[in-house]
């Protein structure tokens, strides 16, 4: 008998991803708290819970200018994620690049 595949216990990170804060992510969505809440509530997790939310998460920008939110599922407390294709929206790409530029400037000042 073959066992079903097990869910990983740790997130994978990929080369070129840059971590940003939730506040910086909010800037990319023009401060739209309702939209960010929607992203947190529509996550990929294999549990069958009817209500779940991404908690204790970190946000990354990949080389396609897409956002990757990695954290825990509030229902089953295992790893969960949300991928947001922001790289297809020129306005969001401008905001993402501005955030990354500011982040780079502040890192060089320290």
Image (cartoon, rainbow, N blue to C red):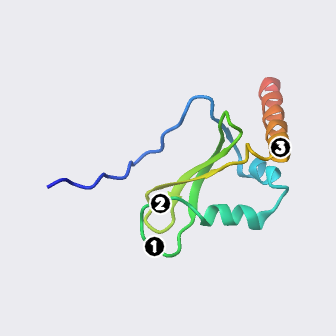
Residue linked to disc 3:
90
Q: Is residue 81 left or right of residue 66?
A: left
**Left or right of 54 on screen, residue 63:** right
The residue under label 1 is 49
Disc nearer the start of the sequence (3/2)? 2
User: Within 10 Å of the Cα at label 1, are there few (<14), some (14-19), or many (20+) other Cα atoms?
Assistant: few
Q: Please state the horizontal and vertical placement of residue 87, each as a whole percent of the image.
A: 73, 43
Disc on res. 10: none
Residue under the point 39% across and 49% down: 9
Indicate the position of residue 46 as horizontal and vertical percent values.
42, 61
The CA span between labels 3 and 2 is 29 Å
Disc 2 target residue? 45
Quadrant where the N terminus is found in the figure: bottom left
Q: What residue appears at the point 66 percent right and 61 percent down from the top-left corner?
A: 39
Using the image as rendered, state which of residue 60 and residue 1 is in the foreground. 1
Are the residues tagged 2 and 1 within 8 Å (C-beta)? yes
Return the residue nearer the eye: 16 or 56: 16
């Amino acid at each position: 008998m073959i066992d079903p595949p097990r869910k990983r216990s740790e997130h994978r990170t990929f080369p070129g991803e840059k971590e940003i804060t939730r506040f910086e992510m909010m800037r990319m969505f023009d401060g739209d708290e309702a939209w960010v809440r929607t992203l947190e509530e529509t996550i990929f997790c294999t549990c069958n819970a009817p209500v779940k939310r991404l908690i204790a998460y970190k946000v990354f920008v990949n080389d396609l200018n897409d956002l990757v939110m990695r954290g825990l599922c509030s229902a089953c407390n295992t790893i969960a994620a949300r991928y947001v294709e922001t790289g297809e929206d020129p306005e969001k790409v401008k905001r993402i690049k501005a955030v990354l530029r500011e982040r780079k400037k502040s890192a060089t000042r320290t």
